[in-house]
Image (cartoon, helix red, strand yellow):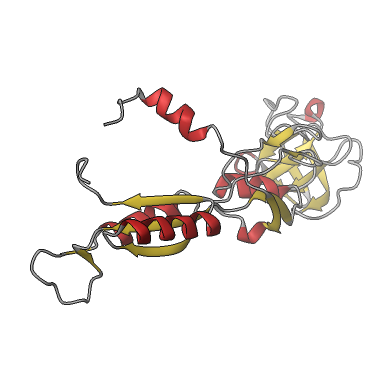
């Protein structure tokens, strides 16, 4: 019987001949759960421009506490004009802060009447403004190679306008179930036989880990056939997983 090895030694031996999987380009919409093959660098600032964090009015902080004419309306997606001196602009969440403005006061604190807005006095510079690049700066590493692309990561990539990503190819896995006593569900059981409960469980676990299961093979208790099926699995798959066998046996 082979001498038992510590887990660390077994892992080292297991991984000694492992090589990285090749990369492939796929659409971002199909990349959920996949693993990045290379790091992604931001090409855009996030936010891409100074914008309002509130529905309200944008102005120069030095004009707070005054009644100001409303000189323009800025909705999200529209281009703001430079703010005229001594005025404010109606602005909505996500709207571009116009050149010249430096703060936003929420609409609940403002009274507008006849085209003029009464602005409270305590509005500091920068209030309710999301500055360009506050979350991400152009040139920052957005995601590192090896990261799995789940919901947040996909959102980061889409926010940069990315449509395709380089990901590691899914590992192809052959799943072998050994033993004459194991039969597939739906087959009448003979004395001494059991249904194969491991196969569907392990297949789903492998898929959860990101694998593509390319073979589901039943291996009889025959040495020559076992060798032949293992060789075939190794030729077709990146990883061979076998289940079955009890104690040391023959």
Q: Residue at x 72, y 31 (%)?
A: 134
In this rendering, does residue 92 appear at all? Answer: no
What is the residue that sits farthest to the front in this orientation? 224
Q: Position of residue 41 (x, y in %)?
A: 76, 38
In the picture, measured across the screen, residue 242 lies left or right of residue 43, that is left
Camera-side residue of 182 and 155: 182
Q: Nearer the viewer, residue 212 or 54?
A: 212
Whether residue 68 sits left or right of residue 38 in the image: it is: right
Residue 6 visible (yes or no):
yes
Q: Quadrant of the N terminus?
A: top left
- Relative to 75, say whether 217 is above or below: below
Above or below: residue 6 compared with residue 19: above
Q: Which residue is the extreme one toward the left?
A: 191
Q: Nearer the viewer, residue 211 or 177?
A: 177
Q: Position of residue 9 (x, y in %)?
A: 42, 24
- Residue 124: x and y, percent? 71, 24
Q: State the residue at coordinates (47%, 34%).
A: 14
- Total marks shown come to 0
Q: Residue at x 62, y 41 (%)?
A: 20
Image check: 133 left or right of 177?
Answer: right
Q: Position of residue 191 (x, y in %)?
A: 8, 68
């Amino acid at each position: 019987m082979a001498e038992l090895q510590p887990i660390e030694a077994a892992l080292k031996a297991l991984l000694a001949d492992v090589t990285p999987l090749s990369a492939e380009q796929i659409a971002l919409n199909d990349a959920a759960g996949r693993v990045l093959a290379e790091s992604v660098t931001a090409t855009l600032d996030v936010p891409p421009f100074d914008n309002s964090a509130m529905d309200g009015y944008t102005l120069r902080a030095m004009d707070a506490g005054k009644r100001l004419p409303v000189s323009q309306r800025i909705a999200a997606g529209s281009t703001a004009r430079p703010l005229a001196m001594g005025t404010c602009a109606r602005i909505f969440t996500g709207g571009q802060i116009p050149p010249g403005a430096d703060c936003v006061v929420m609409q609940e604190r403002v009274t507008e009447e006849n085209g003029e807005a009464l602005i409270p006095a305590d509005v500091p510079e920068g209030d309710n403004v999301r500055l360009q690049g506050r979350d991400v700066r152009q040139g920052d590493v957005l995601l590192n190679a090896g990261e799995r692309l789940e919901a947040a990561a996909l959102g980061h990539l889409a926010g940069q306008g990315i449509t395709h990503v380089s990901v590691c190819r899914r590992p192809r896995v052959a799943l072998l179930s050994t033993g004459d006593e194991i039969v597939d569900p739906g087959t009448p059981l003979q004395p001494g036989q059991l249904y194969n409960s491991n196969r569907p469980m392990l297949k789903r676990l492998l898929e959860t880990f990101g694998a593509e299961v390319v073979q589901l093979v039943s291996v009889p208790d025959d040495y020559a056939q076992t060798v032949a099926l293992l060789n075939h699995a190794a030729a077709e798959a990146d990883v061979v997983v076998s289940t079955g066998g009890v104690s040391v046996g023959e």
